Amino acid sequence: MLIMIDTNVIYSAIFFPDSNIAKMVEYIKSNHVLVLSKYIINEVDDVLINKCKDNYLEIKCSLNNLIDQVIDVKGIDSTKYPTIRDIDDLPVLAAAIILKVDILITGDKDFDDVVVDKPRILKPRQFQDEYMK
């Protein structure tokens, strides 16, 4: 399966390496294809640069090793995509739709009301309960 994880999931995996979310990301990497959008990578970079100056490069390399595919989506026409509460999250949703990912994993509540056939939008716990038995 093609799976995209959102920025908040990446943060949890990076800052809590022994967490269930970190284990989930490792599971995805080992069993599926992990894709990210350039937008997500840029969001992660912004936080890493500010919070992890001393080991930024090490963390960045670890993140890069996880990713199987990256897409850069520019010039998004919001009228061509489902409505999302926070327009700043549209690049993530658009990338998931364009790449035709099977599952988008996010803890962001702004995705809760998105109506779309594909990708399936799951919370980390939902993914773990359904796929990591």
Image (cartoon, grey):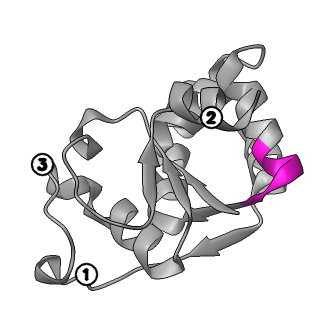
Contact check, label 1 and label 3, Cβ < 8 Å: no
Mark 1, other Cα within 10 Å: few <14 / some 14–19 / many ≥20 = few
The residue that disc 2 covers is 130
- Above/below status of 14 relative to 49: above
Of labels 1 and 2, earlier in sequence is 1
What's the residue type where badge 2 is placed?
Glu
Residue 33 placement, left or right of 130: right
Q: Does the magenta stretch include residue 16?
A: no
Q: In which quarter of the image is residue 9?
A: top right
Q: In which quarter of the image is the C terminus?
A: top right
Q: Quadrant of the N terminus?
A: bottom right
What's the residue type where badge 1 is placed?
Ile
The residues tagged by marks 1 and 3 sit, at their Cα atoms, a distance apart of 16 Å
Contact check, label 3 and label 2, Cβ < 8 Å: no
The residue that disc 1 covers is 76
- Above/below status of 18 relative to 115: above
